[in-house]
C-alpha cells in the first residue's frame, strides 16, 4: 500500500496519543463523572499489531448549594480522584485507505477515592420549626480508597491526517474486580458554637466483581515518531 494511504504506522514505529474522555471514566453513569484525560504510548510490532502502555487521570471538585422551603440550606462538596495504569495490545482487522478499525484488549490497575461533605444549616428557624438560625449538622463520608483490577476489551477507529499525525476514537466495555478499603463516615452537630455530637463510623472492607460498569470512550490526537 502506498505510504500516503497507510492507515496505521509501519512496523517499528512509535506513537504517543493524547486523549480526553468526554463522558468521564464511566459513560454508563455520565452524570456522575467529570471529563478526564489519558496518555497512551504505542509500539507497532507490525502494521497490524501494536503494544500499548498508558494512564488515565480523573479529578473532580464540585460544590453546590440548595435551599429548601422548610428554612434549611444544603451545602454539598464532592471530591473524586482516580488514576489508571494500563497495558495491552491492539489488532487491526479492517481498513480503507487512511481509516483503520482495530480491536483492543487492555489490562490494568486503578486507584480511586471519593469524599463527600454535606452541611445542613438552619437559615429560618420559624419555617424549619426547630433550632436556631445558624445551627447545622455536617456529614463527611470518605469512600475508599478503592483498588480496581480490570480488563478493557474495546474497539478503535483511526484516521490518518498525514505521515505524523492522526485522530482517533476508542470505546471500551470493562470488566473489573474492585477492592474497597475501610470507609469513614463522620457526623458533627453544632448549635450556637457548641458541639453536641461528634461521631465517626468505620465501614468494613469489601470487594466486588463488576461487569460493564467501567465503560469509557476516548477521543485522541496521535503523534507518530
Image: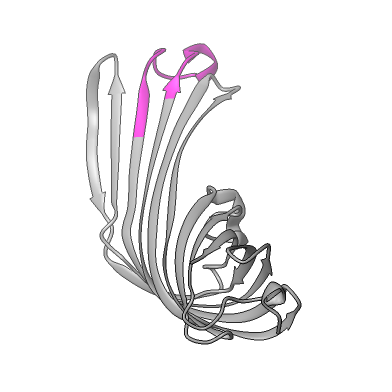
Q: Residue 146 appears at what percent x and percent y? A: 33, 62
Residue 51, compared with residue 163, is above or below; it is below
Q: Residue 159 appears at what percent x and percent y? A: 69, 67
* Residue 55 visible in the shown view: yes
- Residue 137 falls in which quadrant of the image? top left
Q: Residue 59 appears at what percent x and percent y? A: 43, 47
* Residue 209 visible in the shown view: no
Residue at 25% in and 50% down: 201
* Closest to the observer, 7 or 128: 7
Residue at 57% in and 25% down: 68
Magenta part of the chain: 121-138
- Horizontal side, residue 158 vs residue 121: left or right: right
Quarter of the image for the N terminus: give it.
bottom right
Residue 19, compared with residue 125, is above or below; it is below
Q: Residue 17 appears at what percent x and percent y? A: 51, 62
Is 81 included in the stretch rendered in magenta?
A: no
Is 133 included in the stretch rendered in magenta?
A: yes
Colour scheme: one colour
- Residue 111 falls in which quadrant of the image? bottom left
Residue that protrudes farthest toward the right in the picture: 96
* Closest to the observer, 169 or 192: 169
Amino acid at each position: 500500500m502506498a505510504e500516503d494511504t497507510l492507515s496505521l504506522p509501519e512496523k517499528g514505529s512509535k506513537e504517543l496519543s493524547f486523549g480526553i474522555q468526554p463522558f468521564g471514566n464511566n459513560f454508563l453513569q455520565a452524570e456522575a463523572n467529570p471529563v478526564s484525560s489519558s496518555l497512551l504510548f504505542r509500539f507497532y510490532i507490525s502494521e497490524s499489531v501494536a503494544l500499548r502502555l498508558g494512564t488515565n487521570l480523573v479529578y473532580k471538585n464540585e460544590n453546590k448549594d440548595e435551599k429548601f422551603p422548610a428554612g434549611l440550606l444544603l451545602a454539598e462538596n464532592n471530591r473524586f480522584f482516580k488514576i489508571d495504569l494500563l497495558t495491552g495490545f491492539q489488532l487491526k482487522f479492517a481498513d480503507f485507505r487512511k481509516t483503520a478499525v482495530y480491536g483492543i484488549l487492555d489490562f490494568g490497575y486503578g486507584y480511586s477515592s471519593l469524599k463527600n461533605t454535606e452541611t445542613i444549616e438552619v437559615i429560618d428557624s420559624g419555617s424549619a420549626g426547630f433550632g436556631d438560625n445558624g445551627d447545622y449538622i455536617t456529614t463527611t463520608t470518605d469512600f475508599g480508597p478503592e483498588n480496581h483490577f480490570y480488563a478493557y476489551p474495546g474497539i478503535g477507529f483511526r484516521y490518518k491526517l498525514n505521515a505524523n499525525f492522526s485522530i482517533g476514537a476508542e470505546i471500551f466495555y470493562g470488566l473489573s474486580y474492585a477492592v474497597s478499603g475501610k470507609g469513614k463516615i463522620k457526623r458533627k452537630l453544632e448549635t450556637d458554637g457548641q458541639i453536641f455530637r461528634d461521631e465517626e463510623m468505620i465501614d468494613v472492607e469489601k470487594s466486588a466483581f463488576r461487569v460493564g460498569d467501567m465503560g469509557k470512550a476516548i477521543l485522541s490526537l496521535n503523534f507518530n515518531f
